[in-house]
Amino acid sequence: MINLFHNIEGKNQEKLLYTLEATRLKFSKNEYILDKITEKNIVGLVITGSLQIIKTDYSGNRTIIDELKPADIFGSDISPLRGNEYEIFTKEESVIYIIDFDSILNLSLDRHYHQQFMKNLLEIMNEKMKMKNERIEILTKKSIRNKLLEYFNIESNNVGKREFILPFNFTELADFLAIDRSAMSREIKYLKEDGLIVVKGKRITLLYDKY
């Protein structure tokens, strides 16, 4: 995914953050942070570390909505953050910038790096929409097998190879696919036995012709 500061020099990045009145926040590992973000309509930029957006339903079932890495963004109009069932959780020590969305809307475009910033933001939001559509395609599959195969196809296509590294551990993968961990483990076992995949730790190799 493109960086929000792609093609913007370091000194201009600092000027831009100052103009946008960005707030720098640092969080420890395993910290829930959504209640520490006071602005209602924001864009968050991950500088270091990694975070997850989690939804927990009334029965306590967790679903991973998004996995956020350095240079990734999240926000009120980008990610589902409204409602008590959503939370942002740091997987490791993390630094993020919080920008009020109104500051972005009011940004003048008379400087070239302002224009580049807006172009980058639109490209990132377009990529986010593509990822959401892929997620919907996964979740509409009826069986656990088909959900797994659809997810594996997407990850394989993203790297352009049949072999790829899962961005999650298997418990997180089950949460991401909104399926039972034990049932998913059985299905992965069947996929291996059927000669469709090879699994070595988090490394997956596809042996079938992708559809």
Image (spheres, rainbow, N blue to C red):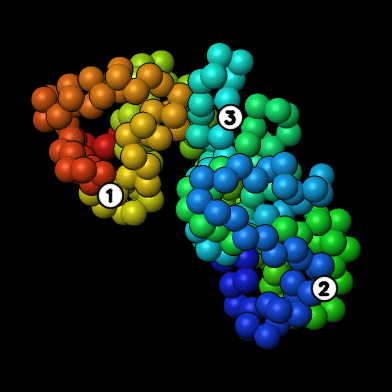
Rounded to the nearest angstrom, the CA distance separating label 3 from label 2 is 33 Å
Q: Nearer the viewer, residue 171 or 152?
A: 171
> What mark, if any, has residue 55 been given in the picture?
3
For the residue pair 3 and 119, the one nearer the viewer reads as 3
- Residue at 44 percent of width and 29 percent of height: 175
The amino acid marked with disc number 1 is: Phe
- Dot 1 corresponds to which residue? 164
Disc with the residue nearer the chain's start (3 vs 2)? 2
Labels 1 and 2 touching (C-beta < 8 A): no
Residue 19 is labelled as 2
Q: Quadrant of residue 7?
A: bottom right
The secondary structure type at the circle numbered 2 is: helix
User: Is 28 in front, or is 181?
Assistant: 28
Callout 3: SS: strand
At label 2, counting other C-alpha atoms closer than 10 Å, the crowd grade (few under 14, some 14-19, many 20 or more) is some
**Considering only vertical position in the picture, is 123 above or below 75?**
below
Q: Is residue 151 above or below residue 202?
A: above
Q: Is residue 131 left or right of residue 198?
A: right
Q: Position of residue 36 (x, y in %)?
A: 72, 47
- Looking at the image, tell me whether mark 1 or mark 3 is earlier in sequence order: 3
- The image quarter containing residue 182 is top left
Q: Is residue 89 left or right of residue 155?
A: right
Q: Position of residue 122 (x, y in %)?
A: 68, 58
